[in-house]
Amino acid sequence: MKAPVLWVTGTLAVATALMASSLIATTTRGANGPFPSSAGPLEVQTVAGGLVHPWALAFLPGGRLLVTERPGRMRIVSRGGELSPPLKNVPAVWASGQGGLLDVATDAAFAQNRTIYFCYAERAGGGGRTAVARARLSDDGAPRLDAVRVIFRQQGPLSGGNHYGCRIAQGRDGNLFVTLGEHFSHRDEAQNLGNHLGKIVRITPDGAPPPDNPFIGRDGAKPEIWSYGHRNEQGLAINPATGVLWEIEHGPRGGDEVNIIGKGRNYGWPVIGYGIDYSGAKIHHSTSKPGMEQPIKSWVPSIAPSGMAFYTGRLFPKWDGSLFTGALAGMMLVRLSLHGDAVTGEERLLQNLNERIRDVRQGPDGALWLVTDSSAGRVLRVAPAGK
């Protein structure tokens, strides 16, 4: 059964709408390169530094950026590369382990409604869970969030600080897809439709389950669930060539996956997979099972993929249609060449940069924009040398 067409809006639509506007003026401080690639030498420019474990970025009108920091700060990066003070009214986050303030996305109609969505680790009892909020971005003098409202809270056993997932993508209908990790120590719950662990959910901008979700009306199943059997999904994007949702998730020791997401499908964790436990113990019954989906790409050993973007820009015509993901443990940028729904090749880029790459986006200028995960994190712009 073919995955349903969702069509692309959200962050990609905002980026497209901004093509005519000026981007941030990148600085020369911390410039790196040239780095070799199949598209020619690459230059990496530092747009902004001084960030503490930045996690995600989103493009704003007027050539600015919105960036999150895991300890709980959200900032605007100006066209000149200056960081704003932390935005006011960001909810308290549980910045413990892998948790904190995580993904951020602008609404498809951001230019009119100033709405953003973000997800974060929220303290609940003796642990944490993934929460999703919406807000209106106001920056008339003092940048802040207004009308902040939590629209969704993950239900199920709590996390001790790991595997929150927390990537957001928006479909043409305005509904939101959000990845939710299985909290590491509760991996079997990824197969349990009675909670949100190890799931991708689909919700309206107000947080309600849309009436055409696959498990609406099914006893014992959460109505927000779109797909299940996931581990720790830190990449999510809609393929602009087909309108179909794609996802990338972390495996344990081996078994990172790229998946094409279908409505109501089971992606197998932890029943099937290609990795082993951190102790070396066996996790999976096998690598396949009827009724469970296969990834279109897996990595053994793990690269720890995070963030993803389909490339459609003009700066790298040889890379048109490629899929990019950052790598944390692998400390590189990975390009996957595609033919339809098949991965036909892999190119490993920026390995000498020695940075954990947490997020990757295509900018309105056609460059690749990255954030690096460290206590001295940076926003980087990757372009052909000299451009």
Image (cartoon, helix red, strand yellow):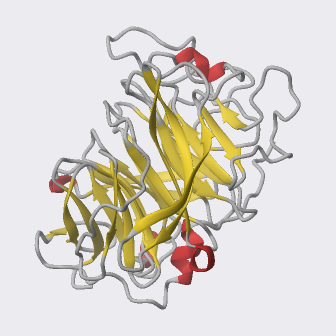
**Residue 51 or 43: which is nearer the viewer?**
51
Q: Is residue 296 visible?
A: no
Could you tell me if residue 153 is visible in this image? yes
Q: Position of residue 84 (x, y in %)?
A: 28, 70
Front position in the image: 369 or 217: 217
Q: Residue at x 39, y 89 (%)?
A: 22
- Could you tell whether 147 is left or right of 215 in the image? left
Against 177, residue 274 (above or below) is above
Question: How many labels were placed on the picture?
Answer: 0
Find residue 286 and report its image quarter.
Answer: top right
Give the percent coordinates (x, y) of residue 383: 30, 75
| Residue 292, quarter of the rendered image | top right
Front residue of this view, candidates 181 and 95: 95
Looking at the image, residue 346 sits to the left or right of residue 340; the answer is: left
- Please tell me whether residue 123 is drawn above or below residue 18 in the rendered image: above
Q: Residue at x 34, y 48 (%)?
A: 72
Residue 63 location (% of width, % of height): 39, 82
Residue depicted at x 39% and y 28%: 162
Residue 317 horizontal side relative to residue 45, left or right:
right
Residue 315 image point, x, y percent: 39, 81
Hey, which residue is sitting farthest top in the picture? 281
> Is 91 or 37 nearer to us in this picture?
91
Question: In the picture, which quadrant includes the N terminus?
Answer: top right
Left or right: where 368 falls relative to 323: left
Q: Residue at x 47, y 72 (%)?
A: 138
Instruction: Name the outermost residue toward the right.
Output: 217
Which image quadrant: the C terminus? bottom left
